Image (cartoon, rainbow, N blue to C red):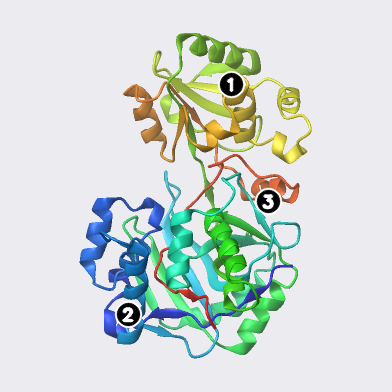
Amino acid sequence: MADVQPLRALHYDLAKVGPLADVVAPPYDVIDPALRRHLAARSPYNVVHVDLPESNGDPYSVAARTFAGWQREGAVVRQGQPGLWALTQSYDAPGGGGRRERHGFLCRVRLEDYGPGRVRPHERTHPGPKEDRLRLTRATRTNLSPIFALHSDPQRAAWAALEPATREAPWGDTVDADGTEHRVWCVEDPDAIAAVQEALASAELLIADGHHRYETARVYAEEVGGEGAHRYVLMCLVALEDPGLTVFPTHRLVRGLRPEQHETLADAIREAFEVTEIDRAALVPRGDGPLRIGYVDAHFKRPFMLTLKDPAIADAALAGRPEPYRRLDTAVLEAVLLKGALGMTDDDVSHLRGMGYARDDEEAWQLVDSAQFDAAFFMRATPVEEVREVAAAGESMPPKSTYFFPKLLTGMVFNPLVD
């Protein structure tokens, strides 16, 4: 079972640094240079100064000195008692669907090897850490960003234990550029913490976002060795049953196709799928039923719906894989068309050789319409239960099979890796 613990967090003293909006940032891997400049200009204490340090020499040493300086100044302080940090995120669903609210909590979780009953990945990723994040962890000896993970809690008992604290004013709140309102409360009540731990006593955690950060944390823990705070990692846990948890689709695009590959792809589509011309507005499949994928190419620029002719096609292409995986649209697309017809390898997919992704259907259309890509496959959103079933079967989904929105901000709390 996963070992879920409160933490004596490092956090900003908002009385000194100003509102939370001035010091938090999106995840580092979505920040381009222009956004970094904007965030850095908001405050000398904005987390990008540490999470994305800049220097003509060693940026990691700069990050360590900056973070240590904030602590000496009292801009960042250590929590007196261990606690959990309740988090709500009120957001507008991408592509419409109204306002929703997701509930979770920040904690620390003991690092484990992936496996049943403890922690599982849900997507196929590059093994090993990202060297940049590992060097930053070595320098700061702190988890700066939380990993996003899911757990089963049918009665929502963990949130029920934390919810009373959220009736008070939050410790901090901010609205990000996407219009998502993030509100966070520190919960130090021992009874509430014990109730959360009891609710998760037999929980298996499924990493939704942050696989590389988890790998980085494991490598760092082994480097340090022995026992201590470095054996834990900062996580935000959300119940699979939370009504605000929704998975959104990520569409696939291909480019660089030679003329003969266009023909091979067209033949494979006609062989495996019923092809129906549709309105452009209906390109993203919705609901249950037969496996369907929207399709448009740069030559005809006409929208089509591809409906798998027979589940046996998926069974043959994914022979030896568990049944939940063989029903996964991203897995079938990858096996039948990307690998089967176009000859892509796992390495091609992982390194985006000849392909790309788009989370917005309009963006996907425009990339094909402008001939930046040769074709686009419009995917349906993967239901949360399907994500869980694939992981429980011991499989990892193809990369970008899921898009969990909203993202978690960096800078709400930090997890020190020294006692």
Callout 1: SS: loop
Mark 2, residues whose alpha carbon is within 10 Å: few (<14), some, or many (≥20)? some
**Type of the residue with mark 2:** Trp
Disc on the earlier residue, 3 or 1: 1
Asked if the residue under mark 2 is in contact with the one under mark 1, i.e. CB atoms within 8 Å, the reply is no
- Horizontal relation, residue 237 to residue 136: left or right: right
| Tag shown at residue 296 | none
Residue beneath label 2, please?
Answer: 70
Residue beneath label 3, please?
Answer: 388
Residue beneath label 1, please?
Answer: 343
Callout 2: SS: helix
Q: Quadrant of residue 217?
A: bottom right
Furthest toward the left, the residue is 41
Callout 3: SS: helix
The span from disc 3 to disc 1 (Cα, nearest Å) is 29 Å
Residue 239 % position (x, y): 62, 63
Furthest toward the right, the residue is 320
- Horizontal relation, residue 104 to residue 358: left or right: right
**Type of the residue with mark 1:** Gly
